[in-house]
Amino acid sequence: MRRLRGCLAAVGAVALCLAALAGGIWYRVEVAPTEVLTDVSPDGAYELTIDRVGEPDWPFGATHCRFTLRGEGRQSLERAFSIQDDGAVARADGVQVVVSGSEQGDRVYVLGFDGSAEESEVARR
């Protein structure tokens, strides 16, 4: 009986370690944000951060990202987007970001300093 309990405890410990390892891998691949770019407005009042969320889809899939616009000590806007392949322009009322790639149409995101967001697709030439 004592030997059986010892074996069950060992199997349980190994299963727990494997579950922790699998959870760590899942977090890194699917959830963990990685900062790609941070840019500050010319007057220093606003900051745009672009994070990659997780790893690109397998195989050769989209990369999931997130814009975060912060200003005046608070987060103004957070917006998720995807890039199929691998700019930001400051405007008076916000930031304009163009996401382009060979496997998708160009997308223009306008992130307003007031928390508004617009998204449009640019026609290919």
Image: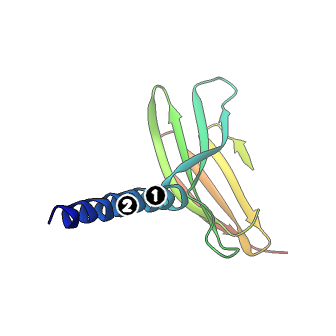
| Residue ID for mark 1 | 21
The circle on residue 39 is none
Specify the farthest residue to the right: 125
Q: Is residue 116 visible?
A: no
List x then y, in percent, for residue 71: 51, 31
> In which quadrant of the rendered image does the C terminus lie?
bottom right
Q: Residue at x 37, y 61 (%)?
A: 14
Q: Nearer the viewer, residue 112 or 105?
A: 105
List x then y, in percent, for residue 85: 74, 67
Q: Residue at x 64, y 37 (%)?
A: 92
Q: In terms of secondary structure, where does tag 2 sit?
A: helix
Verify CB contact (< 8 Å) between mark 2 and mark 1.
no
- Closer to the camera: disc 2 or disc 1? 2
Q: Residue at x 63, y 23 (%)?
A: 44
> In which quadrant of the rendered image does the N terminus lie?
bottom left
Q: In terms of secondary structure, where does tag 1 sit?
A: helix
Q: Residue at x 60, y 41 (%)?
A: 49
| Residue ID for mark 2 | 14
Q: Is residue 14 left or right of residue 66?
A: left
Rendered position, 66 above or below 45: below
Looking at the rendered structure, the kind of residue marked 2 is Val
Q: CA distance from mark 2 to mark 1?
A: 11 Å
Residue neighbourhood size for the residue with mark 1, other residues' Cα within 10 Å, grouped as few (<14), some (14–19), many (≥20): few
Quadrant in the picture for residue 40: top right
Q: Is residue 27 left or right of residue 55?
A: left
Specify the farthest residue to the left: 1
List x then y, in percent, for residue 69: 54, 40
User: Which one is earlier in the sequence, the residue at label 2 or at label 1?
Assistant: 2
Q: Is residue 34 left or right of residue 76?
A: right
List x then y, in percent, for residue 95: 63, 44
Q: Nearer the viewer, residue 89 or 18?
A: 18
Looking at the rendered structure, the kind of residue marked 1 is Leu
